[in-house]
Image (cartoon, grey):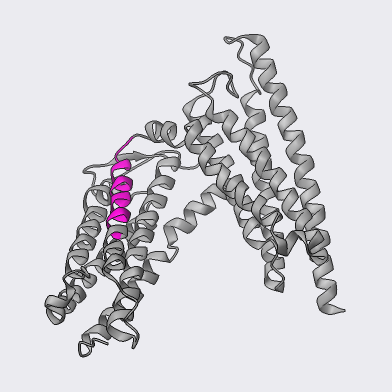
Amino acid sequence: MVRVNGLVDRLVQALKTLKSKGRKKNRGLIRSIMFLKKNDCSIDWEVRSSVCWILRTKQLPLLHHHVHELLKCLDPASLHLDTNQRFQKGLEILSEIDNCMDQISVSIGSVWDLPRPVDSQENVEALTPFRRHRLVHNSEGILGLVSDVLGRFEDFISHFFVSDDSTLRTPSTNNSLVRLAVQDMKVANTLIESLGQSDFVVFLRQWSFTERKRNLDCPLTSLIILRNSSQIKGNPEKSLVRKQIEGLVALHKLHRVLVLKICRFPNIKPGLIPETSFLELEGLRVTTSTLEYELEQIMQYLGHTRRPDFVKLTLAMDDLEAAFKRVKGLLNQAFASPNYNFDRETYQNSEQWIQLWISQFNIAANNFFWISNAYITEKLSSIYY
């Protein structure tokens, strides 16, 4: 074991503290999630603010720079050359990272606030709800990546300089530590660059057919694997859980069908809606993303038996029902004033497809709610009686 007086303890504690800070949901993210749930695009549709410019050009790049400095300072390949001085320098850099995180959190938290008259009018940009939501999640994503980097360095230093068993560390694992950190920061840099792109460019990229299909396939595959696992498939006591999973698979498949149909517009035919504005496209993206978020929340609670999870599952089902109503409302609104500039038959076929999808999702949702309520009742009965 190599121990460098009290510096190593202070360094490990600083890494641990900042790792937790980067993973903490802040006010901006909570408000962004609430916007997704409410989906009221008519409120403050567009505001002009410099917060995006500040984050994109100053605060996030500065955080990126300090993390790279930390990588050089704590590089396992050369850390043994001047450990004491490097640990001291590492603490100084972590202090700078701490300040950066605080500034970024304040900026993210203000994204959903209306600009005050006294705010600077320099470098202002128009921020739609979609752009604000993207800004919050990209910034949170960068903080999360930084947390991952700090967490891996915390593990390395704790193991090599604090633990009595430091024999498991090899040059290959040390190289992997730096390589993973560099890859994470490349992703962070890409997120920073994307904040300078227009909403429409990002919309088309993120909602490309291939991109969305890949993202949607992951949770569906996880559900199918869980359904077929021995702990679920071969356990008679888990029959209701299995039915729940099957019901959620059906909902995921229907959600996937709708999103991929939307993604086929406007570049690939046949699309979902023959004509729509970017505002409506953005609304569809937000509402279907909300639906996806609620399905993922429910997925997390499946199979849990602790009583607090019953409450969470019930609330998640209520949120899913509300999200479906918003999707249904927006889809119906798209055909409220028919526009026959496009082929009338194509337009009518799209409307029929939407009504069929709405009815199928409604049936699947009611089936899932019924099974889930039966599951909750069964578990509560086993607890109280």
Residue 76 lies within the magenta run: no
Residue drawn where x is 28% and y is 49% of the image: 189
Q: Where is 73 relative to 259, above or below?
A: below
Q: Where is 178 relative to 334, above or below?
A: below
Res 270 seen here: yes
Q: Is residue 137 left or right of residue 91?
A: right
Q: Quadrant of the N terminus?
A: bottom left
Residue 323 quadrant: top right
Q: Where is 360 relative to 319, above or below?
A: above
Q: Residue furthest right?
A: 385
Residue 184 lies within the magenta run: yes
Residue 195: where, in percent of width, then height? 32, 43
Residue 261: where, in percent of width, then height? 59, 29
Nearest to the observer: residue 313 or residue 150 = 150
Q: Residue furthest bottom?
A: 5
Number of numbered discs on residues: 0
Residue 342: where, in percent of width, then height? 58, 10
Q: Is residue 342 left or right of residue 26?
A: right
Q: Quadrant of the C terminus?
A: bottom right
Residue drawn where x is 42% and y is 51% of the image: 137
Residue 178 quadrant: bottom left
Residue drawn where x is 62% and y is 60% of the image: 300
Res 113 seen here: no
Q: Is residue 35 left or right of residue 158?
A: right
**Magenta extent:** 181-197
Residue drawn where x is 51% and y is 20% of the image: 268
* Magenta part, dominant SS: helix
Q: Is residue 239 left or right of residue 116?
A: right
Nearest to the observer: residue 257 or residue 51 = 257
